[in-house]
Amino acid sequence: MIVSQIFDMLDAGIVVLDRDLNVFKWNRWMSTHSKISAEEIVGKPLFDFYPELNKSWFLRNCKSVFTFGNFAFISQKLHKYCFPFKSYYNSLGYRFDFMQQSCTLGPLRNDSNEIQYIYITIQDVTEIVAYEQKLIEMNIKDGLTGVFNRRFFEPRLEEEFQRHRRYNRSLSLIMLDIDHFKHINDTYGHQAGDYILKSISLLVEKKIRNVDIFARYGGEEFCCLLPETSLDSAKVVAENIRKQISDETFHFKDKEIRLTLSQGVASLAKDIESAEALLKKADDALYAAKNTGRNKVVALQ
Amino acid sequence: MANETVEIFSDEEKDILQEIMNIAFGNATADLADVVDIYVKLSVPSVQVIEIGALPEYLRTTIKTDGTSNIIEQKFWGNFKGSGLLVFPGGTERDLMAILEDQDREDISNIQMAALEKGGLLEIGNILIGACVGKVSELLDTFVTYSPPQVLQGDTNNCNFLIEQFDPSQTAIVMKTLFNFKEKDINGFLLILTNHESIGWLRKALKNFMDSYE
């Protein structure tokens, strides 16, 4: 049979299951990636080999195909993969524990049009996922420092502002600016400046929680949004960051560089009616910090 | 034109189709609960015969195309062929996700959430459209195959391609049913559109269906 040759030569997995979810067919692609030969698995329950598939989402899709004769599409976005196959993909700076898969389930009917089997096709989409992640990352992260960029930050600020105001929760914002950054660039060169921006980003990220959103707002100015955080707690966070940076000695090539940060802190309050107003208040606080000696935290009530 | 429409599909045939849909959707509801643990209530369906020319306006007014609806479209092929359209109001995505409650939700960022919600919409759409169309086909003693479902952005321009698949001189049968999920307060509706080509076959199938009761 000409058509049946495709079954083994296709660059995709094909599995056929009977109504009890025993394996009826297992193509060569499946053997290659699973390291389980057709001889070993055919006639045996799929779940003996892949107990992790014995979950409601997988059963729901199989049952729906058997019952309604429809197709089920198991997207990589929802499930990442069906069959845990090792991934050898390693490019664009990504490694995946398992091959990312996009799968389709459908009915197979016998001569009397009854659904006797279901098939599953498995497509390796790891490379596409890597490109997708890279694109997303490039879109939301600052290329130099790796922290979020302004494009990502602004809508998040708006979202968090609306959410916290609706539920009457506290939300704080810190604006950070490197003191005399121009001086660093002029004295040590722009590469040193870039190095400082990267180092400070790393240090600040270690001082904040996972839920906080830290972004490069522009130049040497950064923003940190702290959900569910009062003004007092935000001041403590900012003070910790200030101290850490002013205690640190940065080494670039054979040069030692010392520097400080000025920070402005603001929190959601009744008189703040928009995300922009919150940003403005934190910015005003930052200017107050700059104008009253730098290397300090100013919070505006 | 109106007279022609009646000739193509009589009131009696419309009633039979409505009855078939009623039974089919009843079966679909029962199977959805039994088989996939999705508890959904479907209203008594309505059947309308609409000229293609009037279809864009019908879709525009039926689907609130103000950009906030989630529309999932899936084509089906066979003797009985056409499109299923599932319409949910915007903002229900997360509740819909909860219906597929077994998802592995750890380490999901907001960016991934949007993709997940889309995946969830597709999964729900695929199951509901598949169940309803599948049960109608079963009663009409045929079976259909499907294209992958897709999420349409809720604006009218995107509905135009649905109309393009119809010959403008022809007639469409539109079956509409409202549904709501029992545990979640989500209401939406399902449209099944079938074109002229299916009508001849449908008449035969409806006749056979009635004959089996006589």
Image (spheres, coloured by chain):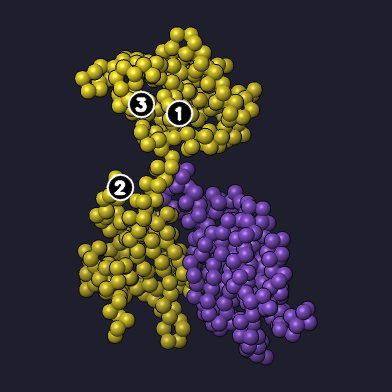
Chain colours: A yellow, B purple
The relative height of residue A36 versus residue A173 in the rendered view (above or below) is below
Residue B14, percent across and down?
Answer: 71, 79
Along the line of sight, which residue is nearer the eye, B102 or A142?
Answer: A142
Most extreme residue toward the top is A293
Q: Which residue is drawn at 43% across and 75% down?
A: A107
Which quarter of the figure has residue B47? Answer: bottom right
Left or right relative to B128: residue A100: left
Q: Quadrant of the N terminus of chain B?
A: bottom right
The relative height of residue B203 versus residue A21 in the rendered view (above or below) is below
Which residue in the structure is indicated by mark 1?
A: A218
Looking at the rendered structure, the secondary structure element under dot 1 is: strand
Mark 3 to mark 1: distance in Å?
Answer: 11 Å
**Mark number, residue A197:** 3
Which quarter of the figure has residue A122? Answer: bottom left
| Number of dots carrying numbers | 3
Q: Residue at x 55, y 26 (%)?
A: A279
Other-residue count near label 2 (Cα within 10 Å), few / some / many at <14 / 14–19 / ≥20: few
Res B148 seen here: yes
Looking at the rendered structure, the secondary structure element under dot 3 is: helix
Along the line of sight, which residue is nearer the eye, B95 or B8?
Answer: B8
Left or right relative to B92: residue A194: left
**Mark number, residue A92:** 2
Amino acid on which the number 2 mark rests in the picture: Leu
The relative height of residue B7 versus residue A71 in the rendered view (above or below) is below
Mark before the other along the chain sequence, 3 or 2: 2
Which quarter of the figure has residue A9? Answer: bottom left
